[in-house]
Amino acid sequence: MNHAYILTLSCPDRPGIVHAVSGFLLDRGGNIEEAAQYNDHDTGLFFMRVQFACRQLTHDDLRLQVKLFAEPLQMRWTLHATSEPMRTVILVSKEGHCLNDLLFRWKSGLLPLHIAAIISNHREFYQLAASYNVPFHHIPVTAATKAQAEARQLEIIRSEGAELVVLARYMQILSDDLCRELAGKAINIHHSFLPSFKGAKPYYQAHDRGVKLIGATAHYVTADLDEGPIIEQDVARVDHSMTVEDLTAQGRDTESQVLARAVKWHGEHRVLINGHKTVIFK
């Protein structure tokens, strides 16, 4: 049986937190295998991620003892067994490059996930989903049916016990209510260095402006459109000789890689939200 866990926490900074955490684990037979911490001097907050092995306590007992330990230190914390891959639902529209990349990485053992379902407002990728033996849910969305569609999406997300929702080029704006419901567990991929070239046909806009760099941004979903905490970004160099199609192809590669890294880090519990920013223990 795997007895490895990941503990993440944040709390008001004070002397001795690392000592307190390591002592807490030692007293319960825990052996720390990986640890990282960060002190944000601007906010006065302390962040920590600890991966450790513990055979003396069950998961439930350990969770209870962490709760009692954390309360006087005003800690926000999570505890996860490394043997339990993160249950994930993917939303997608008509562009499948990010979906295809995530599915391949998952089946290759490169992502610590269990992709439980795919939801789309179009039918294009039902065969791709079937080839990976992942349930596919077609939920059309119109202005008149948006509320009912989101209710059905949320029903699926809840029934699958999803801890992560990935918007893999899902080209619908989520309602404020759904954004709040998914706060901290929904990741979107945006086709630019935010906030440049928002809206439709970003690579046409970039080509028209003669850009020399194109990029992609993975961020958490919030009610403020494309303003959520950023997890990962990257760029690719381009030049005057490249067509719109060249830029689009290069951009899709960058989007896929950026989203995959963000999803992997989230699945490994390496990302902690710090207000409108993130702390990432790579």
Image: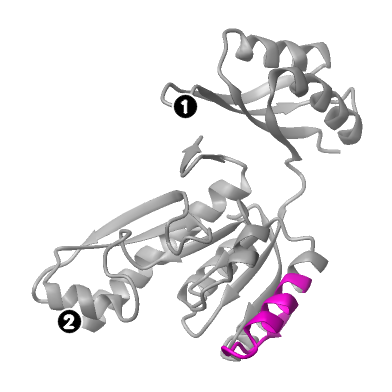
Q: Is residue 105 above or below residue 15?
A: below
Sooner in the amino-acid sequence: mark 2 or mark 1: 1
Q: Quadrant of residue 268?
A: top right
Estimate the spatial distance between the alpha carbons at disc 2 and disc 1, rounded to whole Å.
45 Å
- On residue 43, which mark appears? 1
Q: Is residue 45 above or below residue 97?
A: above
In magenta stretch: residue 27: no
Disc 2 designates what residue? 243
Left or right placement of residue 176 versus residue 85 in this view = left
What residue do we see at 23% from left, 80% from top? 204
State the quadrant of the N terminus. Answer: top right
Q: Is residue 229 above or below residue 211?
A: above
Is 151 in front, or is 205?
Answer: 151
Q: Amino acid at mark 2?
A: Thr
State the extent of the magenta-drawn residues as a range. 136-155
Is 113 in front, or is 185?
Answer: 185
Q: Secondary structure at mark 1?
A: loop
What residue do we see at 67% from left, 80% from top? 147
